[in-house]
Image (cartoon, rainbow, N blue to C red):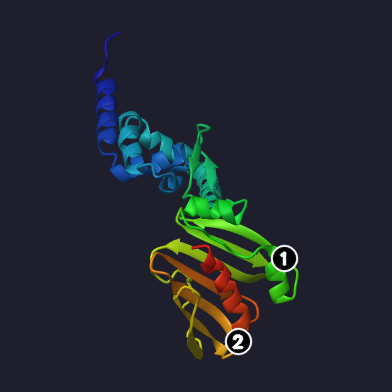
Amino acid sequence: METTDKERERAQKLFQAFGEIKDEHVEDAAEHVRPDARSDERTKIDHSLRVRRLNRYLVPLAAALVLAVAAGAFYHVQRTDNAAYSSMDTESAQESDGTEAVASANPYVEAQSAEEAGNLAGVAFNVPDEAEITKILGTSVTAQYFVLDGSLAEADYADADGNALLTIREEAGTDDISGDYTDYPYETTETLTGGAAMTLKGNSEDEFFLATWTDGTDSFSIQALGTGLSLTDIKNIAEQVASGN
């Protein structure tokens, strides 16, 4: 069938209109086609690469697509984006194709015992058991053991209500690993068996919240999170921890 001059004119105008479609229009169309595009930052996928790939297919359809779906898709995009942002603090999310996108890994790994935590961290980690800490603190405690970043062993003691009472840490090196930078009003030094100088910090000469020391190979810390510990109690705990090295 022979093409008329009017049909040629219409086709020419149509192609000119497509040629004038701007990148931001294509971007907008891509957003409507893939309403989960903003979640690409969470899954570390280069969104600009997706847009460039979509260009090849969307340019002939972009203008019509934007006009057809903009009104209805805007609300859907907003809801989808909000859901994506609310799930960013989870450990994993499902992509639209069914694959699992894993977010940043938790630096804490739970261990079943102090011995396991020490083995994973590469330190001795000889800490008092629950019965010993219960006797020292005068309240029943349960213990959990963790390894942070594969090198720091940690024991956390809590009461029956889950309130944290005591944290003991050990890691290879000589740095302060306590994570406690409180400006306590009272500070003193005690020498442990073996010669290590232990720094004690607290409110008074018999109410301590922090003990830190190094034996030249490993670093240690004891932190009271509830009430302060007496000099006798915190030193007894420290002696047991130090005795494993």
Residue furthest top in the image: 1
Foreground residue among 192 and 222: 192
User: Residue 102 location in percent, x, y?
Assistant: 49, 43
What residue is at 57 percent from the left and 54 percent from the top?
Answer: 115
CB-based contact (under 8 Å), mark 2 and mark 1:
no
Indicate left or right for 50 with 161 as reference. left
Neighbourhood count class around disc 1 (C-alpha, 10 Å): few under 14, some 14–19, many 20 upward? few
| In this rendering, the label closer to the viewer, 2 or 1 | 1
Kindly state the secondary structure of the residue where label 1 is placed: helix
Looking at the image, can residue 200 be seen?
A: yes
Q: Which residue is mark 2?
A: 207
Indicate left or right for 21 with 234 as reference. left
What residue is at 28 percent from the left and 35 percent from the top?
Answer: 17
User: Residue 150 location in percent, x, y?
Assistant: 46, 53
Foreground residue among 126 and 8: 126
**Count of number-bearing discs:** 2
Residue 179 sits above or below residue 114 on the image:
below
Q: Earlier in the sequence, mark 2 or mark 1?
A: 1
Amino acid type shown at disc 2: Glu
User: Residue 72 location in percent, x, y?
Assistant: 53, 42
Amino acid type shown at disc 1: Ala
Kindly state the secondary structure of the residue where label 2 is placed: strand
Residue 65 sits above or below residue 212 on the image:
above
User: Residue 45 location in percent, x, y?
Assistant: 38, 42
Residue 117 sits above or below residue 129 on the image:
above
Distance from disc 2 to disc 1, alpha carbons, whole Å, reads 22 Å
Q: Which residue is mark 1?
A: 131
Foreground residue among 146 and 20: 146
Looking at the image, can residue 229 be seen?
A: no
Quadrant of the frame with the N terminus: top left
Quadrant in the picture for residue 229: bottom right
Neighbourhood count class around disc 2 (C-alpha, 10 Å): few under 14, some 14–19, many 20 upward? some
